[in-house]
Image: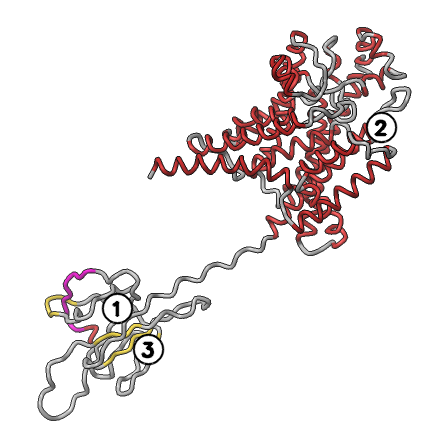
Amino acid sequence: MTRPQPPGSHRRGTDRPAPPRPPVPALVPVPGVPRRTGTHRAPEGRPDAATRPASRPRRPSAPPGTAPGRTVAVPAPRTAGPPPAPSVPARTLRTASAPPDTTESTETTTVLPATTRATPAPDPAPPAAPEPAPPRERTSRLLGVDATRGVALLGIIAVHALVEATDDGTPTPSYLVFGGRSAALFAVLAGVSFAFMTGRARVRTGPDLRATAAMLATRAGVLMVLAMALSWTDPSIAALILPYYAVAFLLAIPLVALPTRVLAPLAVLLCTGVPVLSHLVRPFLPVPDLGNPSVLDLVTDPGALLSELTLTGAYPAVVWLAYMAVGIVVGRLRLSDRRTAAALLAGGVVAATAATGLSMWLLGPGGGYAAIAAVSPPEILDSAPTIVDAVTGYPDGVTPTSTWWWLATVAPHSGTPLDVVQTTGSALAVLGAVLLLASVTARGAGPLLGHLLRPLAAAGSMTLTLYVGSILFMNSPLDDLGPWEGYLWQVAVAVGIGLAWRRAVGRGPLETVVSAPAHAVRDRLRGRARDRVA
């Protein structure tokens, strides 16, 4: 590439040879000037001006924005007569580079007579911007995650709307399928959302971590206010998960600052170790009332309320922190990759199957059921026709601490190590399966799959709004329907509202209520940090 030279600086002395010039691909022909291409060779028998001895003093570079060019001095033809007049420096006309969509650019130099005014060099054309990648990757990921949230929402509604046990205390099949697993899937997806909100990477300590912590704490505060506003609802119909989520959000703030190589083993430790620690600590804590927390509880007995929300309640935040840790790790993966989705599906199935099989062996041949029956009070034994049904249906967030054998169950909402591993595995398996289906849809195949996943994704994009709507409906006089009839009506209404709202507005109303102040706090702190640096 030649050095740009300002006008009037083309004379060269004879004290040193000029450096060789690179070839010029093409020249614009000018009448009376021989056309030159390639290496600028002079006409046969005449020395090339570029090979004459020359000296060139160091000159300042051309102003920014001017296009580089080359000067070609053309000697006059030899003719008989008086000697030619002293040479006059030629002026260079620079032309713009080739259009940005060509694969190679050309530079053209035109030699004009000295009496011709040089044309100003135009600014070089900017390089062609790369074509944006098709949004298939992001679309399949968001479609899969939102559709999985939709599955979790329908499962939560099933737990609330359908019957958990028969008249004699035997757990129903719907409760065995959806109980515990749907809420765990919600918690894992909350961790995935944490990863998305933090750029799917570790948050560095300093201003970024402070802004992220303020954002998550604001979300937790808004969720707690919303939970307090719903405290009048009947916990026997639906125990609110929102206040437990608010506390879990606060506990999860340090997790976003951990690298994945540290967070992944910590998530495993939380799944297996925290339930054991909870079993040790809970005998010394107040007995929970398992009601929906209210402002009165916060004022009159904050210690008991904190104990219930963290360790002894229906969704103990310390135990459920394990689901969020797993979700953050998963959210940092490349979820649009089909191999990742397949690994989540296979790994989740293996984990859930292994935990279930180990529980069956420990409680059956291992003697767990007999040991539990020997120390259980009559209210537990009388709650179901058999000890197996009693152990399966009795836990409500945590298990009794009368014997360590309780930790061997995988009963819904038992919060044992095997229950956390099993429900985490089922959550990963569902997420992996839906991501695989979404990847097929994103590739333009499977229109039937698209018709199935898009309504689920629409409902999953506003789960908080639809969850609260379901709670309000079931606590109103409008819910005079049978269990299955009411459930199917809620599913139809949730999917219909989700599709209509997403097409007309976008983000759900309660989702906006939660995210808007959180993002405002985050952006304000980031702005302050930038001002301090400036």
Q: How crowded is mark 2: few (under 14 residues within 10 Å), some or many (20 or more)?
A: some
Disc on res. 86: none
Residue 410 horizontal side relative to residue 125, left or right: right
Residue corresponding to mark 2? 163
Residue 273 seen in render: no
Splitting the image into 4 quarters, where does residue 479 fall? top right
Residue corresponding to mark 3? 27
- Residue at 67%, 48% in the rendered image: 502
The colour scheme used to paint the residues is secondary structure
Query: Is 496 part of what is drawn in magenta?
Result: no
Q: Is mark 3 on a helix, strand or loop?
A: strand
Q: Is mark 1 on a helix, strand or loop?
A: loop
- Residue at 24%, 80% in the rendered image: 112
Residue 148 horizontal side relative to residue 5, left or right: right
Q: How crowded is mark 3: few (under 14 residues within 10 Å), some or many (20 or more)?
A: some
Q: CA separation, marks 3 and 2?
A: 86 Å
* Magenta-colored span: 52-60
Q: Which of marks 1 and 3 is nearer the N terminus?
A: 1
**Residue type at numbered disc 2:** Val
Residue 134 seen in render: yes
Placement of 183 over or under 25, stated as above or below: above
Q: Which of 109 and 231 is in front in this view?
A: 231
**Residue type at numbered disc 3:** Leu
Q: What is the x, y in percent for residue 363? A: 80, 16
3 or 2: mark nearer the eye: 2
Residue 465 horizontal side relative to residue 57, left or right: right
Q: What is the x, y in percent for residue 98? A: 40, 70
Residue corresponding to mark 1? 21
Q: CA separation, marks 2 and 1?
A: 87 Å
Magenta span: predominant SS is: loop
Q: CA separation, marks 1 and 3?
A: 15 Å
